[in-house]
């Protein structure tokens, strides 16, 4: 139960990061946001390197990494993948509405699927690790916000991202979702 | 001592310019990068991760060339000439940044990381300095480098090869049921 609570906290942090990224793009624009995201990724790599070198990062940073990383995961890895996914979206999509929709799908959809999915019982026929509730929650929570930003094509992208997230994959969901958003938004135009 | 500082940019900038132009040449870039890789591998005894790094570099190269062909973004120097003649190929993502950041990311947790990171940052800076890439295109190289390392690990696992111990950043940890 405690682990479930920690996971909920992680996912709420995930949503807040997504909302923060959306606000950042709205306030300072795509280009400056991409600069900030790349600087954050470089700093993140340095912090993970320091952590791997068994150096104490300071009480606050250690608490943050421990609090928002899954047990057994490399400290800070989740934040790094999220950052890399956002950076890929910011640099590879050229339309701001599509960028905002992609960040909404990444930030809100993935978190909603985890929070609801962990409480659902009905497993997906093609992946026993994921639930139908989680996949539906991904779409229901992310599609309306994505639609507000990028219109009807965003519904298709949100559905495809929900399916991609539900598929059996050995790589981090953040990266899978970002790739799906980038490819589909590029194909539908932008 | 004080009089030395105003002269510093005058000394550094020609060196930066010469190094940037040298790195722009694909053959020089490849030879220099490979030599640096071998030197650091020998110096820090990181031989075991060399095949994995070479795989990551090959994937990065394929990914970069493929994305350039798919995205077809023109060079920023086409409209406004930069410091060198504008290259003829597309520009997104920056291959220099992509390859050097792949080296840096795959070295996280190793003693060679700092040197690779400095090299990658300089390579990225040089592309923008020469006017052949925008900062965004270089940043895309950084994002793609992360993806290249993930794909290299996936390939390594698909081939049932053991990931070398010196590759510290594993991309398959802590999956969660949802």
Image: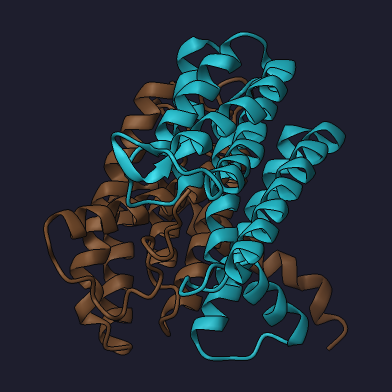
Q: Quadrant of the N terminus of chain A?
A: bottom right
The chain in cyan:
A
- Please indicate whether residue A13 sits to the left or right of residue A154 in the image: right
Q: Could you say which is closer to the camera, residue B137 or residue B169?
A: B169
Where is B147 relative to A62, above or below?
above
Side (left or right) of B161 relative to A176: left
Q: Position of residue A72 (x, y in %)?
A: 46, 74
- Viewer-proximal residue among A55 and A129: A129
Residue B76 visible from this viewpoint? yes
Q: Residue at x 60, y 58 (%)?
A: A41
- Residue A106 rendering spot, x and y as whole percentages: 59, 38
Image chain in brown: B
Up the image or down, A103 lies above or below B61; here it is above
Does residue B109 sit above or below B28 in this rendering? below
Residue A137: x and y in percent read 58, 33
Please state the horizontal and vertical placement of residue B11, each as a whole percent of the image. Answer: 66, 69
Q: Quadrant of residue A98?
A: top right
Determine the image quadrant of residue A102: top right
Q: Is residue B85 visible?
A: no
**Quadrant containing the C terminus of chain A in the rendered view:** top right
């Amino acid at each position: 139960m405690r682990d479930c609570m920690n996971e909920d906290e992680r996912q709420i942090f995930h949503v807040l990061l997504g909302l923060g990224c959306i606000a950042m793009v709205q306030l300072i624009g795509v280009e400056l946001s991409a600069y900030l995201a790349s600087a954050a990724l470089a700093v993140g790599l340095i912090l993970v390197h320091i952590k791997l070198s068994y150096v104490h990062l300071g009480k606050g940073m250690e608490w943050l990494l421990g609090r928002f990383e899954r047990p057994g995961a490399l400290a800070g890895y989740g934040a790094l993948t999220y950052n890399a996914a956002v950076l890929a979206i910011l640099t590879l999509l050229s339309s701001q509405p599509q960028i905002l929709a992609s960040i909404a799908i990444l930030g809100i959809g993935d978190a909603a699927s985890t929070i609801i999915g962990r409480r659902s019982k009905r497993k997906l026929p093609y992946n026993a690790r994921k639930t139908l509730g989680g996949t539906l929650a991904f779409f229901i929570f992310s599609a309306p916000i994505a639609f507000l930003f990028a219109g009807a094509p965003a519904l298709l992208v949100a559905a495809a991202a929900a399916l991609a997230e539900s598929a059996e994959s050995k790589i981090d969901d953040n990266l899978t979702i970002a790739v799906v958003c980038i490819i589909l938004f590029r194909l539908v135009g932008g | 001592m004080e009089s030395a500082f105003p002269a510093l940019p005058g000394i550094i900038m020609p060196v930066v310019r010469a190094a940037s132009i040298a790195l722009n040449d694909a053959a020089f870039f490849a030879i220099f990068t490979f030599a640096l890789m071998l030197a650091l591998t020998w110096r820090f005894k990181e031989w075991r991760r060399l095949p994995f790094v070479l795989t990551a570099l090959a994937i990065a190269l394929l990914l970069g060339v493929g994305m350039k062909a798919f995205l077809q973004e023109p060079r920023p120097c086409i409209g406004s000439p930069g410091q060198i003649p504008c290259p003829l190929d597309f520009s997104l993502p920056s291959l220099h940044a992509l390859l050097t950041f792949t080296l840096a990311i795959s070295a996280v947790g190793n003693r060679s990381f700092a040197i690779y990171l400095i090299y990658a940052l300089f390579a990225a800076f040089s592309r923008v300095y020469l006017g052949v890439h925008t900062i965004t295109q270089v940043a895309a190289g950084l994002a793609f480098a992360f993806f290249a390392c993930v794909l290299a690990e996936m390939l390594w696992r698909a081939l049932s090869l053991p990931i070398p111990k010196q590759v510290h950043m594993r991309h398959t940890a802590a999956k969660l049921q949802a």
